[in-house]
Image (tube, grey):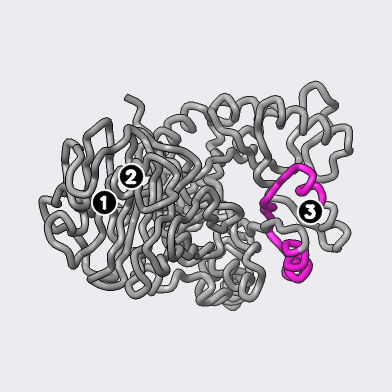
Amino acid sequence: MSNKKNIFLFGLLIVCLLVPGSGFLSAAGQGQERVIPEEIKQQVGQTDYGVVRIKKFPVAMQCWTYRGYTFFEALEKTRALGIDYVQAFPGQRLSRDLPAGVVFNHRLEEEYLKLVREKLNSLKMRVAAYGVVDTGRTEEEMRRLFEFARKLGIRVIVTEPKDDDYPLLNKLVREYNLRIAVHNHPEPSKYAHPATALKYLQGLDERIGVCADTGHWMRGNLKPVECLRLLQGRIVDVHLKDRSDFAVRKAEDVAFGSGKADIKAILAELTLQDYDGFLTIEYENETEVMTPEPAIKKGLEFIKKITYYEDFEPLLSRLNGFYEKHGWNHYGPGHFELDPKTGILKSQGGMGLLWYSRKKFKDFVLDLEFKCSQKNTNSGIFVRVPEVPVSDDYIYHSFEIQIYDAGEGIHRTGAVYDAQAPSKDASRPTGEWNHFRITFAADRLTVELNGQKVVDWKAEPRGKVRDFAGEGYIGLQNHDSLSPVYFRNIYIKEINN
């Protein structure tokens, strides 16, 4: 081999080591920062995503999907799809009725900002997020961006910060109570690998997290579900994409469920993480720039099909990532503590009733999880409580679905207390979460415990129950101070007969 050839190959090696996106970068340039830890891969491999009851996530449209149109046209087309929220990007022409140089960005003059508000209000839409945008380097520049977000009610700013941006961003998210989502464009972007973003986020305010772009991860031959698991607790926004293949130049965006991203596992992982942000649709198939609707509609139908809680209403409200007991009142001794981060209710003292006061329910499906601290933990779920509880009299006019593993027959977990015994013991071991699905339609009361039907009963006054109403409140019982019960994921679906 000639000296010239040796020099050329040595130079090529140096370039590969230094240039992002080269084959040598992962091994020499970035080290472990470019590797999904084996522990994360094992965790994902051991997770049965098929049994996860997928939550319903709010959906937004990234306006880049409609990059061939103006911002106002993108709003109209998004609204026509039944989507109420958008994520705007800087640089999109505002309207065909305005000069081409008038584009959506955080430097919009007030007269154009007024037009944006009027358009959003006319369509009953909101801008949920803004990006990917350069925040600027100075505090003045960043404040202008944050003030713009505040004016439009934008909660999330999507960006790819420079190293020196983080101290200022950390200060401003606290002051403005907004969130920053660090986006992962593919290489040579600095944040192409999730471990890089995770490194920068260490020690920062929790309002600074990531915008997880599943399609860009696939371009880099990364499995989205593994990346999501690595970033658990720091995901602020998701750019949801499905692609026909991994790391192949000719691969393209396809309808959700039609590609290799494994959308079901992605949504299941987000459910397990209790993700509270938007699924932001960003469809980048270049052959369908002007007509993305067929693929989007197909993808939304797929998401709807795999979403367990699609038609359910959560009974614990959530605002800015924190759970609240708004709408719940307590009768009697004791109380329930709510962990605002996890949404887990824990009973304290008793005997009392935490009841949902916002409305009475007639025919419904009630879906929730509970966990017993001890085998003799005693609690229950009351259905069709006819009136506001002001005394213990409600127990004689409503049914209680029993929680008490130490009981027998009509007093055992799954029973309609004092009236109808469960057909089998389907409880999980003490300390594990159990799942109830309770259906009350007319006078038919069915109880499923951990996927097994244990009661299918034509309700009638029996035992302690003297009579029951056609509609009523939902209530959770706290029984004593020694063996607390825990509840989470409380959802209800009304049945219209």
Residue 159 drawn in magenta: yes
Label 3 sits on residue: 146
Circle 1: residue type: Ile
Instruction: Report which quarter residue 171 is drawn in.
Output: bottom right
Dominant secondary structure, magenta: helix
Disc 2 marks a residue whose amino acid type is Val
| Residue 358 image point, x, y percent | 50, 42
Q: Is residue 258 visible?
A: no
Q: Is the residue marked by circle 2 packed among few (<14), some (14-19), or many (20+) residues within 10 Å?
A: many
Quick check: 174 left or right of 1? right
What residue is at 29 percent from the left and 70 percent from the top?
Answer: 431
Where disc 1 sits, the SS reads: strand
User: Which one is in front, 363 or 174?
Assistant: 363
The first of marks 3 and 1 along the sequence is 3
> Magenta span covers which residues?
145-174
The disc placed on residue 383 is 2
Which kind of residue does numbered mark 3 sit on?
Phe
Count of residue discs: 3
Q: Tell me the number on the disc at residue 401.
A: 1
